[in-house]
Structures are given as structure tokens and as C-alpha cells.
Image: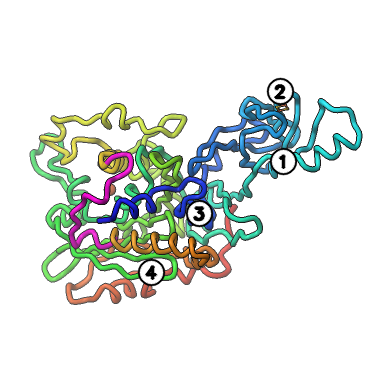
Amino acid sequence: MLTPEENELLTRTGPGTPMGELFRRFWQPVALAEEVAAPDQPPKRMKLMGEDLLLFRQSDGRVGLVEPRCAHRGADLYFGRNEECGLRCVYHGWKFDADGRCVDVPNMQPGRARDNIMKTARIRSYPVREWGGQIWAWFGPEGMEPELPMVEWALVPPENRYISKKLQECNWAQSLEGAIDTAHFSYVHRVLSEEGTGKPVYLDKRQQWIHEDGAPTFEVIGHDGGLVMGGARRADPGELYWRISQYLVPNHSLAPGTFPGEPYAAQSWMPVDDENCWIFTVTWCPDRPISDEELERYDSGRSVHAMVDENYVPHRNRANEYMLDRELQRTRLFMGITGLSEQDAAIQDSQGRIADRARETLTPSDAGIVQFRKLVLGLARDLQQGIEPPQAQRPEVYACHSGGAVEPEDVSFGEVLERRFGHPTAHATDLLPGRQAAE
Ligand code: FES
Ligand SMILES: [Fe+2]
């Protein structure tokens, strides 16, 4: 439970808010590279952490993220032309490059006055990098940019990963809490029966264990990049099935399901405003390309990747109640909604645009959520006092893993982590250094 004041602190990320300032101390994923695949295409409207912006790729391939307001008389550069290395306002022809510099003022005669205007007139722009198939932006103080976080999906070749993006119609924090709360798998994603059989058909033992033990015990260990969390369920006699996830400061998580050889999965939350966010979902394999079968599954929305339209809005969404089917709910799916991603979206949205954490009743299975709030609220408060978040300057702490393990029930969580990942907090020391970014 949080006080109303703490809830405000956690959920508001607009300019000038404490959490907004914390977010702005980290490189943030803001778009898929495919959204600005070609140069000189029309600029794309973006809203990020409450700010209206334009994203465009100029003629020389550089990507710009700029405010949409022309420095002359404030016309909207969205209506502008992306041409010859800059965005040209169509009101009087002023032009701005990806750095926000004014590079042409054609409505003035050449001379000193025009030169002065070109030197001083600017639009706000944010530094941008391409990393792991995504566009990342720096919204923080000029010159303070750290190295990009060493997330593993950015270190593998493009064919080893699959990235998607979807709109989530609620606040970022409750959606992230959904991802690190692995207890919900026993309910939200439960399959009651396979069509025609009247009984559950489990894809594998994991599904069965998740179904049969709805009260996992939780352990949480803090580390330099965030938290590693283990949820343990009863497995075969004498054994526990561990689902181990990661929270990485301030807005990333690594998913708990991966067994060795399977693709890893991660998510990042980028607030659009306080009532909506973009979720970037990545699946990747360190050592092999994504298989055709996996690709087919991701493309068809039968996985952690949602089915979305050309604007990345899920087909099943708030407006159509996620196509909730009560007959399906009665007979086959606990939730009555098809699709893993859609099930998560529906239940997270259902907590309200901004969940009211003053009215919760938490249980021991919410341990990860409690620690997440404590950590991120502490960092936001520290920053208000002038203490910078240490994680922001340490890209190597983002190189870590998550996944599942089955171990005898007397093996401690710390030992499970050692055995499964070869490291006490699942950091992927093998990724460092020497692995080069693929793009
Ligand atoms: S308002 Fe943009 S050039 Fe005049
Ligand atoms: Fe889920």
C-alpha cells in the first residue's frame, strides 16, 4: 500500500515531476527503428512522458527527436517537409536539423540580421541513438549522457531478436508491476481446458505446475541494476519450479519463463502520458536466429507479442473490452480473453488509468512489487536531494538474465541463481566485455 502522495510520486513522469526527472537520467527507448526506417519520410508525431515531439530521419540517415513548434511563429512542424537534411516549416520556410539548429531562414534577405537569427533560433531537440533495433533518446541534462545500457538484446545480431511495440492504456507503473508479479500466471493465463477435451492440456510440465500451485513463495535480492525475484512453486515431488524475473531501473523487466535454449524476453515501459504507455517487448536468443516457428508465433499474436494495427494499437483493447468472451471464460480460458499479451493488458488496465495503491491489501506474493516501489521511489527522492541514480552511469549492470529452473526443494534461492546463471544475481558476465553491438 502507498499513500496518495507516494502514488503520485510513483506514477507521474511529466517534465519537472520527481519520477519524470529520474526517467530523464536514463537513456529511454522511444520507438522501433522501423518507425523511421527511411530518410526524408514524413515526421512522426510522438508523445513521450507528456511531451509532444516529432521523430524523423533526415537525408543523411541521422534521426532527430524535436519539439514540433517552429521557432519563428510557432507553426506545427508536423505539417512540414522532411527534405535535404532537415525539417522545413511550411509557413515561411524556416528549416531545422536533427540537432534543432536553424539551418535556413528563406523569408529574410541574406545579411547579418539573418545570420544572427540562424545562430540563435533553435527548437528543442534530444540526442538520439539506435541500439538493438530501437531508437533511444536522452532527455536528461546536456552533456551528462552515459553509455547505452548493455541489455543483451542489443548485443546480438538482428536476426536473433524480435521486437514489438504496443499501446497500453494505463499508467506505466502498474503495468510493470504486472510483469514482475509472476504469481498472476496461475490465474490470468490459466487454460481450463483445450477445445473439445473438457480438461486442461498442458504444453509442458511448467504449465501444469503453474496451474496446480497458485500460491508461490517469493524471494527478492537487490543488486546494482535493480532486483532479481524468484517465485517458487511445487513441481514434481521433492522439487521446486522457480520462475526468476528481473527489474532493471527504472522501467525495464526481464521475463521469468525461459529455459536454457529458449528465447529470453524483456519489456520496457515508456510513458506516453500518465494514463498511457508504450510497451516494447523483445524476445531474443544469444546464440541463434529466431526460428521460423517462433517468428510465426510472434507474428500471429499467440505469445508475449500483441496483435496490433499500423499505429501499434492492440486489436483487443479497452474500447472493445479486449473481445472478452464469456463462453470462452466459462469453458476454456480462466480470463475469457485470447492472447497472453492481451490478458495482461486487460487486467492491468482494469486497475484504472492510474491504480489507487492506497486501497490495496498486499500479500507475501507481492514482495517483488513492494521492493520495486521502495527502490524506485527512493531513487526519485534521492535525485530531488541532488543524489544521482548510480545505475544510470553503469551500463554494465543491465547485462543480466532471467528464466526458469527446477531444483530440489532444499536449494536456496541464491544457490538456484548460481546454478542456473553462474552468478549470484544472474548477471551475465560472459557478455562483458568484447561483445560488439550488432547495429
Ligand atoms: S512559423 Fe515556421 S517559418 Fe514561420
Ligand atoms: Fe502475464
The answer to whether 379 appears left or right of 122 in the picture is left
Work out how far the residue at label 2 is from the one at label 3, CA to CA, in angstroms: 34 Å
Ranked by sequence position, the earlier of labels 3 and 1 is: 3
On the image, the x and y values in percent for residue 105 come to 80, 31
User: What amino acid does circle 4 point to?
Assistant: Ala
On the image, the x and y values in percent for residue 266 come to 40, 53
Residue at 14% x, 64% y: name it.
236
Ranked by sequence position, the earlier of labels 4 and 3 is: 3
**Residue labelled with disc 1:** 122
Q: Quadrant of residue 218?
A: bottom left
Ranked by sequence position, the earlier of labels 2 and 1 is: 2
User: What amino acid does circle 1 point to?
Assistant: Arg
User: Helix or strand or loop: what does disc 1 sit on?
Assistant: loop
On the image, the x and y values in percent for residue 336 come to 19, 35
**Residue labelled with disc 2:** 91
**Residue labelled with disc 3:** 21
Q: Is residue 357 magenta?
A: yes
User: Helix or strand or loop: what does disc 3 sit on?
Assistant: helix
Work out how far the residue at label 4 is from the one at label 1, CA to CA, in angstroms: 45 Å
